[in-house]
Image: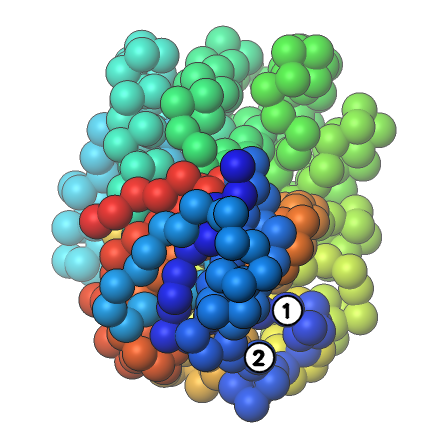
Amino acid sequence: MKKLIGPFTQILPLTGLPLKGALKDEQLHIIPNGGVLIEDGLILAVDDFEKLRSNYPSAQTEEITGNHVLLPGFIDCHTHICFAGSRAKDYAMRNSGKTYLEIAQSGGGIWDSVTQTRAADEATLTSLLLKRVQRHVSEGVTTIEIKSGYGLSVEAELKQLNAIKTTADKTNAGLISTCLAAHILPKDFNGNHQEYLNHVLNNLLPVIKQKGLSKRVDVFIEQSAFNTSDALNYLAKAKQLGFDVTVHADQFTIGGSEVAIKARAASADHLEASGDYEIKLLANSDTVAVTLPGASLGLGMAYAPARKLLDAGTCLAIASDWNPGSAPMGDLLMQAAVMAAAEKLSAAEVFTGLTARAAQALKLNDRGVLTKGKLADMQAYPCDDYREILYQQGKLKPEMVWTEGNITRR
Ligand code: NIG
Ligand code: FE
């Protein structure tokens, strides 16, 4: 059954834009009084509403009243929302002057979330995750990457990945899982970093592969986590097992982005510490640069050099990093809008960073733009001009969100 949705005051299909480099708002193609024709969760046509109505008279109409701007659904290509418990104590300690690393060394940090997540059973973890997914969907995020990494044992990592799979079956949003067993060396592992990574390669990744629980592997490269040579070796072996790879890179110190490029990773994420050398490497690679303003806001640190990355020619995506430690807020649009003001990003750069370029980070080519054949993942903001969306810095939320053509109203 064909369905015609509209009219929308403006549709920004975000098509025809290059995947790499700087963009100006003048490059945006805007369809006034537009409509979207869909069937079976896919887009058949995006065009003038009246024209579609006369060309497809038998299509059922989903009438939109009032002014609305339609965008593709956002794709949050980096989150850690499968966790139990809270790290409000860490946050208060940081705000009293302790550093992220000092807190980790004194028993807080990632290990604290591992303890709390291990203590939760799979059903509890699933219901916590589903609530976060539903909140994200209501804020226009229709595809969400979700990492494990708060299990750090074969059993607990599988529990997290199973919770993600069960949650995916309960929502029309696209959930993409990533194994981040290489988050930190677990305190209860009897061995060094290399031995732990080998343990993951031998005993966890083959099970994930066999059960179809994830196609992606991530590693945190940092002084407090894994070094560059161990990480490069780990990523190479994960690729041999058939996984796509991604890296937590250059968050506090450099080195990670170079490993990501050598490993031909789909993305290098964080990049707060990246300098001119790293920026140039990223611009000359196929690795997507992912900036995580939520982590900068949560840690009170500088943003990644988003403007420089774009001007150098990278494919820049923006994700929330929503996690209980460094990025507890999880409001992707607010974070992107606030960073855009500081880094001087155009709306075209922000919106593609939240859609088509984020799809590239996840190697998804079925979404991120509104055009024939793509998923009908869309969101409508109650305003008459797309510029209102970033102007209101995240307070203006979509009134309607479609995941594969199914509408959720706020
Ligand atoms: O992306 N950098 C490492 N991992 C997460 C933080 C996780 C945590 O603090 O729990 C991040 O910021
Ligand atoms: Fe992260």
Q: Position of residue 311 (x, y in %)?
A: 64, 84
Q: Which residue is mark 2?
A: 29
Describe residue 240's horizontal placement relative to residue 379 as left or right. right
Disc 1 crowd rating (10 Å Cα; few below 14, some 14-19, many 20+) is some
Where disc 2 sits, the SS reads loop
In the image, the residue with mark 2 has its CB under 8 Å from the nearest atom of ligand 2: no
Describe residue 134's horizontal placement relative to residue 292 as left or right. left
Pointer 2 with pointer 1, Cβ within 8 A = yes
Amino acid on which disc 1 is placed: Thr
140 is higher (above) or lower (below) than 208 = below
Q: Position of residue 328 (x, y in %)?
A: 28, 48
Q: Position of residue 119 (x, y in %)?
A: 29, 14
Q: Nearer the viewer, residue 188 or 6?
A: 6
Q: Which residue is mark 1?
A: 15
Where disc 1 sits, the SS reads loop
Outermost residue to the bottom: 26
Residue shown at 51% from the left, 47% from the top: 58
Decide if residue 41 is in sight here: yes
Q: Nearer the viewer, residue 296 or 64?
A: 64
**What is the quadrant of residue 130 in the picture?**
top left
Residue shown at 35% from the left, 43% from the top: 407
Residue shown at 62% from the left, 76% from the top: 309
Describe residue 6's horizontal placement relative to residue 245 as left or right. left
Q: Position of residue 143 (x, y in %)?
A: 49, 44
Q: Nearer the viewer, residue 196 or 139?
A: 139
Amino acid on which disc 2 is placed: His
Describe residue 152's horizontal placement relative to residue 90 as left or right. right
**What is the quadrant of residue 212 in the picture?**
top right
Decide if residue 199 is in sight here: no
- Which circle's residue, 2 or 1, is located before the other in the chain? 1
Marker disc for residue 283: none
